[in-house]
Image: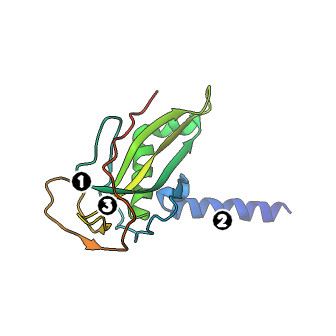
Amino acid sequence: MIRFAVRVVVASLAGATLGCITTINPVVYKRDTGAPVMPERPEGCVVEIFDENQTAPRAVKVLGRIELAWSQDQVQEQGQEYAMKTLKTAACEQGGHYILNMRALPRGFRQGMLFEGDLAVIVDDAGVPLQGVATGTSSSSDGVHVAPSASTSTVPAVAPRG
């Protein structure tokens, strides 16, 4: 019985060491009903995060909610900057370009933080999501079209609270 438990722990630690950042720090993605499933973007892709009173520089379609719940120890050890890096990695995995309405909410006294925002993808003038697009406003790339979207909006964001 003890051998089995040791093997499981060793296997789990090995997987955590080899796994990606979102395996070690699980992110919850809740895709909106009817939102397109976007292809994964390359590792290390650029994802911009927008806070309260900020608007994405291009037209977007919100794909869903993205959340990361961290314990107080994780917040203290890794910091909010690493939480944002984790969310950006998850956004790339889901094909997103922007995280809008970004908030950092306390989960209770010494209970850690919940980081949450709306995952969005850039769309063209017809509302069709694009992939392979640089997120910066200086980019001239038009990207590649993917499945059509139902609606588009430029969404303001919410600032972290803390």
Considering every residue shown, the one lying at the far right of the view is 1
133, 11: nearer the viewer = 133
Of pointers 1 and 2, the one earlier in the residue sequence: 2
Q: Which residue is mark 1?
A: 58
The foreground one among 74 and 68 is 68
Spot occupied by residue 77 in the image (x, y as percentages of width and height):
50, 37
Q: Residue at x 29, y 39 (%)?
A: 54
Q: Which mark is residue 45?
A: 3
Q: Is residue 43 left or right of residue 66?
A: left
Q: Residue 31 location, x and y as percent?
A: 51, 60
User: Label 3 to label 1, Cα distance in Å?
Assistant: 17 Å
Instruction: Identify the residue shown where x is 31% and y is 68%.
Output: 128
| Numbered circle sitting on residue 11 | 2
Give the structural element (helix, strand or loop) at label 1: loop
**Which disc number belongs to residue 33?**
none
Disc 1 to disc 2, C-alpha distance: 44 Å
| Residue occupying image coordinates x 57% and y 59% | 16
Q: Amino acid at mark 2?
A: Ala
Mark 2 residue crowding within 10 angstroms, few (<14) / some (14–19) / many (20+)? few
- Type of the residue with mark 3: Cys
Q: Is residue 111 above or below residue 36?
A: above
* Mark toward the start of the polypeptide (3 vs 1): 3
**Which of the two residues, 150 or 134, is positioned nearer the viewer here?**
150
Question: What kind of element bears circle 3?
Answer: loop
Q: Is residue 127 left or right of residue 36?
A: left
